Image (cartoon, rainbow, N blue to C red):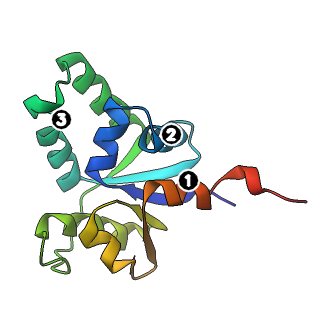
Amino acid sequence: MGKKKIIIDTNNLISALGWEGPSKELFRQVIEKEHELFISVKQLTEIRRVIDYPKLGFTNDQKARFLEIISSVATIVETKTNLDIIKEDPDDNFLLECASEVNADYIISGDGHMKKLGQFRNTKIIKVSDFLKETSHSDFHF
């Protein structure tokens, strides 16, 4: 299986920064270049806003390092489309816009509005744990 073009929602990226678990494992795989990560400029703006939430308790060094890593491993996309697919949470549309423009294989999100879609054009919308199972190398057979 070749590299998959993926978009990871902001919640999963923030989880990768702060806590052990499936999101951190996925981000490790991105860093090891097992998958190709795409992030729109709109999402990058959201990430910068969210990591500043006081309740998350990230230090300035942690925030700067995380943004530095994202910038080095992700392809940043200036999207040109403006979609209005997800009415309940219009901010999530930037994930669909990016997926559409880069022809992503997956959007990885646990968000209810995204999961309800299940698929957008050629992009499968999937939870991080399901993505890790689906793309696991451990089920390789000769």
Residue position for label 3 = 51
Which residue is identified by label 2? 25
Q: Residue at x 23, y 26 (%)?
A: 63
Compared to residue 104, the image places residue 118 above or below, namely: below
The crowd level at tag 1 (other Cα within 10 Å; few <14, some 14-19, many 20+) is some
* Badge 3 density bin: few <14, some 14–19, many ≥20, Cα 10 Å: many
Task: Name the residue rendered at 85%, 59% in the picture.
Answer: 141
**Comes first in the chain, label 1 or label 2:** 2
Image point (65%, 53%), residue name? 136
Q: Which residue is at a point 15% across and 79% down the rendered structure image?
A: 84
Hey, which quadrant is residue 77 in on the image? bottom left
Q: In the rendered structure, are the residues bearing label 1 and label 3 in contact, judged by CB atoms less than 8 Å apart?
A: no
**Which mark is first along the chain, 3 or 1?**
3
Q: Nearer the viewer, residue 126 or 3?
A: 126
Q: Say what amino acid the circle numbered 2 marks.
A: Glu
- Residues under labels 3 and 2: Cα distance? 19 Å
Type of the residue with mark 1: Leu
Question: Could you give the CA–CA distance between mark 1 and mark 2, rounded to whole angstroms?
Answer: 8 Å
- Earlier in the chain: of badge 3 and badge 2, it is 2
Secondary element at tag 1: helix
Residue 37: % across, % down: 43, 51
Q: Helix, strand, or loop for circle 2? A: helix
Q: Answer left or right for 5 relative to 49.
A: right
Q: Which mark is residue 132?
A: 1
Residue 111, position as x, y percentages in the image: 28, 62
Picture coordinates of residue 58, whole percent (x, y): 20, 24
- Label ID, residue 101: none
Q: Disc 1 and disc 3: Cα gap in Å?
A: 24 Å
| Local crowd size for mark 2, using a 10 Å CA cut-off: few (<14), some (14–19), many (≥20) | some
In front: mark 1 or mark 3?
A: 1
